[in-house]
Image (cartoon, grey):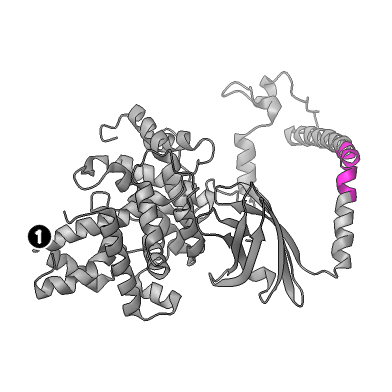
Amino acid sequence: MAERPDCVRMDQLIPELAIGVAAGDERARLLGHLARCTPCRGTLVSASAAADSLLLLAPEREPPPGFETRVLGGLTGETPREAHGLSALPPTSPGALPGALPSTLPSALPDAPPAWPSPPATFSAQARSSAEAEAPLYAEASSPAGASPYAASPHRVRPSSRAGPRTARWRRTLLRLATTVTIAGLVGGALWWRTDDDRELAAGYRATLATAHGQYIRAVPLMTQSATPAGYLIACEGQPSWILMMVRTGDVSGDYAVRLITHAGQPIPLGTMSVAHGQGTWGATISTSVDHIAAVTLTRPSALAITARLG
Amino acid sequence: MASGDTDTAAVFVRRYQARVYGLAYSIVGSSAIAEEVAQEAFLRVWRHAAAYDPRRSRVSTWLLTITRNLAIDAIRLRHELPIDPHLLIASLTARDGGTADTGFEDIDLVKSALRELPIEQCTSIVLSVYYGLTAREIAEREDIPLGTAKTRIRRGLARLRDMLGVTDG
């Protein structure tokens, strides 16, 4: 491979190109060289193969239910795919050498649009009146085309000689409203009675929080890398703030390095937690506000990591 | 896939969905975004199946590379790494990572090779391969000179090539 002076210089750049992270100017220079240098192309192919093989290491994970159906629906165009930002991205060069794919990334893309359009915040009188014209109330829905809806419907509220169709509509609306309110009252009463225990529990929590003088307390689950529950983490904002973790997972024993990750991505080592036979409790004060914690991680060489995500 | 046969597509999706979704999730750290990435990856493979050249790489490599690029695009929008690299390294090199019956025979070899790398080289390689960070970005993040970041990537990848027995094509 790299024997000529040019090749020696370019050989330094090949790994970054193989991974797909070469800077623009270096990338252009290297591609120019590769176009006329067979040995360096060979080096790029082998470096790309090594880099690409690392992608096999990501643990397999079952996608959410219905994933296959949604993908196939998207492929055949039978089902509308959910709108999202990714589909707006420029096409990834699928025919190019995998490791040598362009790494040019859009610096800013529009936020993903919602899957369904939201209704307008205000509904203008004109729009409302044309909506009414196009969507008559239930009784008129079966009217034959071209006939007056009131004349055609056997179930319509008979309008009086002085009350027009609009008045009849209002009467039906009020009747439905009254029925709805009655049913809602009955359901609400039943719900109130059935959730008595929950309300008592909620009152207990409120009292606890009040006792803590409004200090910020959070409890989140600890999860293993394979998405198995592994205990709980409690974080409390204060002077100082602290975290407490209770690990309950399988029959694992060993020391875990505890690290806090801030929202800015900064890792802060907190210490070592010992877990014996899958159980352990550990706590520490922290110098970071609870609000700034993105996650707390427990790692041990050659073992699945455990994570608590706080947001 | 290249034939446009939907039955073949269903078999293909079933075969690779856990691997594609798993890779996307490892990078973006969110099930909703990972699903979008995985869906889009399959869609792009379907659209560009005719352009796939089996002489250049295995189809799994091709599919995973597309997935990785889409996932990196997604995290670039958020301007943050959703998962601590050290956590990701622990996950990638875990002995009990549950990849024994995946049918990808090279996995144990690759895993062991990554485990053998010095941690600073391993971190630089993972940051670039999984998160698409350039040498300059790694240098800033790790607070090291740019030359050091480049050297770590170069030496790390060279050692991987040696350990995996990958020869120049």
**Residue B149: quadrant of the picture:** bottom left
At 58% across and 47% down in the image, what residue appears?
A: A227
Q: Which residue is mark 1?
A: A38
Q: Main secondary structure of the magenta part?
A: helix
Q: Is residue A97 above or below residue B127?
A: above
Q: Is residue A198 magenta?
A: yes
Please, which residue is most extreme toward the bottom here? B145
> The residue marked by circle 1 belongs to what chain?
A
- Camera-side residue of A48 and A215: A48
In depth, the one of A17 and B8 nearer the eye is A17
Which residue is depicted at the point 56% across and 56% down?
Answer: A305
Q: Is residue A43 above or below residue A60?
A: below
Q: Position of residue A98 (x, y in %)?
A: 27, 53
| Quadrant of the image containing the N terminus of chain B | top left
Q: Is residue A99 visible?
A: no
Q: Is residue A209 visible?
A: yes
Side (left or right) of B43 relative to A4: right
- Viewer-nearest residue: A311 or A110: A311
Residue A70 position, x and y percent, is 47, 37
The secondary element bearing badge 1 is classed as helix
Asked whether A68 or B81 is in front, the reply is B81
As shown in the figure, which amino acid type bears the numbered disc 1? Thr
- In the image, is B103 to the left or to the right of A63? left
Res B138 quadrant in image: bottom left
Q: Is residue A184 left or right of residue A125?
A: right
Q: Residue furthest top?
A: A154
Q: Which residues are magenta?
A: A188-200
Q: Residue at x 32, y 68 (%)?
A: B153
Give the x, y percent position of residue A34. 14, 63
Residue at 90% x, 43% y: name it: A196
